Image (cartoon, rainbow, N blue to C red):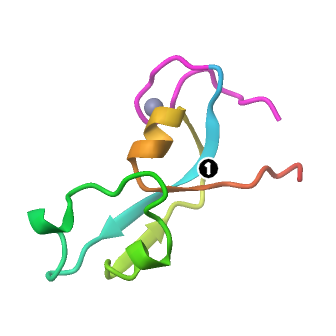
Amino acid sequence: MVAPVTECQNCAFPDTELVRVRRVYLHPGPEAGGPEDGGTLDHGALDRGALDRVDVVDVVDEPEWWCVSCVSQYPCEIAPSPAD
Ligand SMILES: [Zn+2]
């Protein structure tokens, strides 16, 4: 499936190899989010271990097209293509 857009919908960077994802909002609990926690979640952090450390996770239903850089830097989950 070809991306219907030609720039990242997160950072607006022009890219032809966008990844279909659903944005994930993480809401750390009061116990989390400290600097000792390592700060940002990196790529691959959205495993069960990482999700166990946050209280609330909201996944946006509407898929977006992100560049690989955003996919690696921001919480998201890969959205399956509707054509599959
Ligand atoms: Zn981007």
Above or below, 5 against 77 in this view is above
Q: Which residues are magenta?
A: 1-15
Badge count: 1
In the picture, measured across the screen, residue 36 lies left or right of residue 49, that is left
The N terminus, quarter of image? top right
What residue do we see at 57% from left, 20% from top? 15
What residue do we see at 64% from left, 20% from top? 16
- Residue at far left of view: 35
Above or below, 5 against 63 in this view is above
- Residue at far right of view: 84
What residue do we see at 22% from left, 80% from top? 29
**Residue 14 counted in the magenta span:** yes
**Residue 9 counted in the magenta span:** yes
Quadrant of ligand 1 in image = top left
At label 1, counting other C-alpha atoms closer than 10 Å, the crowd grade (few under 14, some 14-19, many 20 or more) is: some
- Residue under label 1: 63
Mark 1 C-beta closer than 8 Å to ligand 1: no
In the picture, measured across the screen, residue 7 lies left or right of residue 41, that is right
Magenta span: helix, strand or loop, mainly? loop
- Rendered location of residue 24, percent (x, y): 45, 60
Res. 36 image quadrant: bottom left
- Residue at far top of view: 14
Q: Amino acid at mark 1?
A: Pro
- Rendered location of residue 71, percent (x, y): 49, 43
- Rendered location of residue 33, percent (x, y): 17, 68
Above or below, 4 against 31 in this view is above
What residue do we see at 39% from left, 44% from top? 73
Nearest the viewer among 84 and 41 is 41
As helix, strand or loop, the secondary structure at mark 1 comes to: loop
- Rendered location of residue 4, percent (x, y): 71, 28
